[in-house]
Image: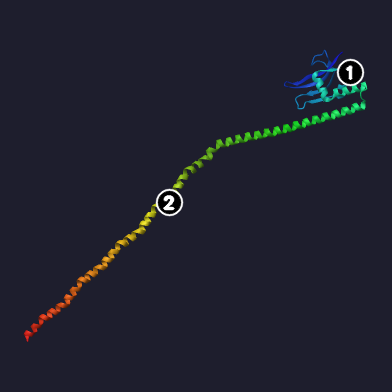
Amino acid sequence: MSTKIRLQRGGRKGRPVYSIVVADARAKRDGRFIEKLGTYNPNTNPATIDLNFDSTLSWVMKGAQPTDTARAILSYRGVMMKKHLLEGVRKGALTEEQAEAKFEAWVSEKENKIEGKVKSLNEAAQVSKSARLAAEAEVNNARKAAIEAANAPVVEEAPVAEATEEAPAEDATEEAPAAEATEEAPAEEATEEAPGAEATEEAPAEEATEEVPAAEATEEAPAEEATEEAPAAEATEEAPAEESAE
């Protein structure tokens, strides 16, 4: 009876989980099997493989033929490498110690590769998570800003509008004294100049006032003289009267 090592599908729709089984080559894919060797979960990265190494190697050495997918899984876990080394020991190409040393070196190298892949995947996942969180934060900030902008005009824009409208009034209030000062400046100058004009006009009046007595004095001088001369005339006229009386 020929046997095969193959995968038997399980799990749910869209997320399959496979069982690694040894079954008769004539059996259906998901039918009866002889032995279950392990499981294979392709939903993780890297894929999770749980395999009974010794039992699988025993079946392979007995001649069980793995399918293509099952062979890839067995090669990944080192079963096919171990089989190759054991065949070399059987043919006398190398000793068991040499075969075991080569296999240990291969396993160590394989584990280092797997660890490096896991580490790089974790770092990439962390970077992707950070970028996603940053993008979500930006979206949240933009949404918050939009909400604040939508609510802001009702409360905040009214005082701003009043301040904007009142600003020219304040400017006008501040500019009004300047305008009045500009207009009052000539008035003050006129006020200061007015006495000068009056002084200029009054100056001739004072001179006229002073000149009037001079004129009167000029006219009165002959009057005084006439007054003084009148008695002299009377005395002249009276003298003959006295003589006639005598």
Where residue 59 sits in the image (x, y, percent)?
Answer: 87, 19
- What residue is shown at x 53% (from left), y 38% (from top)? 153
On the question of residue 228 being in view, the answer is yes
- What residue is shown at x 44% (from left), y 47% (from top)? 172
**Mark 2 sits on what residue?**
178
Position of 172 compared to 146: left or right? Answer: left
Which amino acid, mark 1? Lys
- What residue is shown at x 81% (from left), y 23% (from top)? 39
Where residue 191 sits in the image (x, y, percent)?
Answer: 36, 58
| Nearer to us in this view, 11 or 68 | 68
Q: Quadrant of the rendered structure where residue 195 is? A: bottom left
- What residue is shown at x 10% (from left), y 83% (from top)? 239
| Nearer to us in this view, 16 or 118 | 118
**Mark 1 sits on what residue?**
62
Where residue 92 sits in the image (x, y, percent)?
Answer: 93, 22
Q: Quadrant of the N terminus?
A: top right
- Find the distance from the CA under tag 1 to the CA under tag 2: 114 Å
- What crowding class fits label 2: few (fewer than 14 Cα within 10 Å), some (14-19), or many (20 or more)? few
- What crowding class fits label 1: few (fewer than 14 Cα within 10 Å), some (14-19), or many (20 or more)? few
Residue sitting at the far front: 93
